[in-house]
Image (spheres, rainbow, N blue to C red):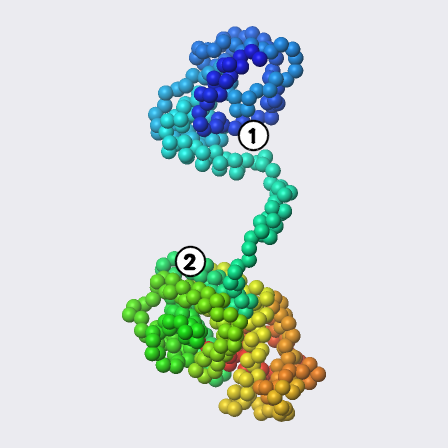
């Protein structure tokens, strides 16, 4: 067709940065070329400034629309103003929004072929404008779901997966680490008030955010020692309770702790998870000693996940950070661990005179008098707690009392954050049994 050679030359000389997109407000039909325009006077509004460098484009014979190459500029070249680098750089935003005049557009595009930094900035601005385009279709690609599923099914599973019983500890340490990454250096010294119960009375201890991380670091060392890993208190440390280990760690610091504790604490948690994952199934029954009591490794890591969540919540309250409870499945496991520990805690309180005497002792493994604990909300369920013998089995048919509580509230009671009297529990049945079980739940707490 006529003028094809000229069009090819102009395309070859086009700058490497694409021309500005057509304005979103321009609703004209851009797929057709208008017919021959009526002649007009040179001073008529809309006449381009400057001399014409090319002759008029010859119209094709016949009627009907004629498609133009995409991105083709106007036939008549606008006058290009001479502008400095600073002015051209300031016009990049307007150029990306198609708000420049024809002459400014030509000047900017000519500059982009010579200035690399401005060309990179122009590309970034053009991409940003594309994201802000109001007319963009926000519907998802209908093939997106099939592509995602295909990618997931084609991906190989982990050769050494993390055991299911380790995932609560993995999740809670990761959530706490995300919180610690978000807070500033000064917030590591924010005061944190720790609270727990000892002998039916509340105990409080002042600490800082860094001090709480040091506490978790020191107590996690009990699990590390059981696995043969390095103890954060150093080799040759005598057997200490969790509270004693924490005090020993705090007193051994030469200066107030700060953000520097995050990395060793996180490295230790990663090492614990990795070691347990590679150790195989038998490691779940390995004994972790807490001086006054012992737990299998499976329950010990669940207990560490529980404490990590509660202390993360303490930190979040101290620095005004939003923090949610664990997911329902993990919260259910934590509540289940507490209910398994309650019969032994109740027996210990009975030996010290803090609980009423047993009424009907039964043989180990036999069903006995029980309390029905109904936990509502996420992670909830029904548990039957043996009242008279720590080795007995809770039996629904021998339930003499019932307590209904919300899941997070029950965990707050077990952690010593609220007292048995403050727990908003629905109670029915033997009042003495209810009082003993709620007191035993609060006695599970410690620093």
- In x, y percent, where is residue 18? 48, 28
- Residue situated furthest right in the rendering: 397
Residue named by callout 1: 24
Q: Is residue 89 above or below residue 185?
A: above
The CA span between labels 2 and 1 is 42 Å
Quarter of the image with the N terminus is top right
Residue drawn at (37%, 29%) of the image: 115
**Mark 2 packing: few (<14 Cα in 10 Å), some, or many (20+)?**
few
- Find residue 181 and name its label: 2
Residue drawn at (48%, 61%) of the image: 175
Q: Is residue 199 above or below residue 329?
A: below
- In x, y percent, where is residue 146? 63, 47
- In x, y percent, where is residue 383? 63, 77
Residue drawn at (43%, 12%) of the image: 50
Residue 276 is left or right of residue 64, and the answer is left
Q: Considering the numbered disc 1 on the image, is that residue within a helix, a strand or a loop? A: loop
**Mark 1 packing: few (<14 Cα in 10 Å), some, or many (20+)?**
few
């Amino acid at each position: 067709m006529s003028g094809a050679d000229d069009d090819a030359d102009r395309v070859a000389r086009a700058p490497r940065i694409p021309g500005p997109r057509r304005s979103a407000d321009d609703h004209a039909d851009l797929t057709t070329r208008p017919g021959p325009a009526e002649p007009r006077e040179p001073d008529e509004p809309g006449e381009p400034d400057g001399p014409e460098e090319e002759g008029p484009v010859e119209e094709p014979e016949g009627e009907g629309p004629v498609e133009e190459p995409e991105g083709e500029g106007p036939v008549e070249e606008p006058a290009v103003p001479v502008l400095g680098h600073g002015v051209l750089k300031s016009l990049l935003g307007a150029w990306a929004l198609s708000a420049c005049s024809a002459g400014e557009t030509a000047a900017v595009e000519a500059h982009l072929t010579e200035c690399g930094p401005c060309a990179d900035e122009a590309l970034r601005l053009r991409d940003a404008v594309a994201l802000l385009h109001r007319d963009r279709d926000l519907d998802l690609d209908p093939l997106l779901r099939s592509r995602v599923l295909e990618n997931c099914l084609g991906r190989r599973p982990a050769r050494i997966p993390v055991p299911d019983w380790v995932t609560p500890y993995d999740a809670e340490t990761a959530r706490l680490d995300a919180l610690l990454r978000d807070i500033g250096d000064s917030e590591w010294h924010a005061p944190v008030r720790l609270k727990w119960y000892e002998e039916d009375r509340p105990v409080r201890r002042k600490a800082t955010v860094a001090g709480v991380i040091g506490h978790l670091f020191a107590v996690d060392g009990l699990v590390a020692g059981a696995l043969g890993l390095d103890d954060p208190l150093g080799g040759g440390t005598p057997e200490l309770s969790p509270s004693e280990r924490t005090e020993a760690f705090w007193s051994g610091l030469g200066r107030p702790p700060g953000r520097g504790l995050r990395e060793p604490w996180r490295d230790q948690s990663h090492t614990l998870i990795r070691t347990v994952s590679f150790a195989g199934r038998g490691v779940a029954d390995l004994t972790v000693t807490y001086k006054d009591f012992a737990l299998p490794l499976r329950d010990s890591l669940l207990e560490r996940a529980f404490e990590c969540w509660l202390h993360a919540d303490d930190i979040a309250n101290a620095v005004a950070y939003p923090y949610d409870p664990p997911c329902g499945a993990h919260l259910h496991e934590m509540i289940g661990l507490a209910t398994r520990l309650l019969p032994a805690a109740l027996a210990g309180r009975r030996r010290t005179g803090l609980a009423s005497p047993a009424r009907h002792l039964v043989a180990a493994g036999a069903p006995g008098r029980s309390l029905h604990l109904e936990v509502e909300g996420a992670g909830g369920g029904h548990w039957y707690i043996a009242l008279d013998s720590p080795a007995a089995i809770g039996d629904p048919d021998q339930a003499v009392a019932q307590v209904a509580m919300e899941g997070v509230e029950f965990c707050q009671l077990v952690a010593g954050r609220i007292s048995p009297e403050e727990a908003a529990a629905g109670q029915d049945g033997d009042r003495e049994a209810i009082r003993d079980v709620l007191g035993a739940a609060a006695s599970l707490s410690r620093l």
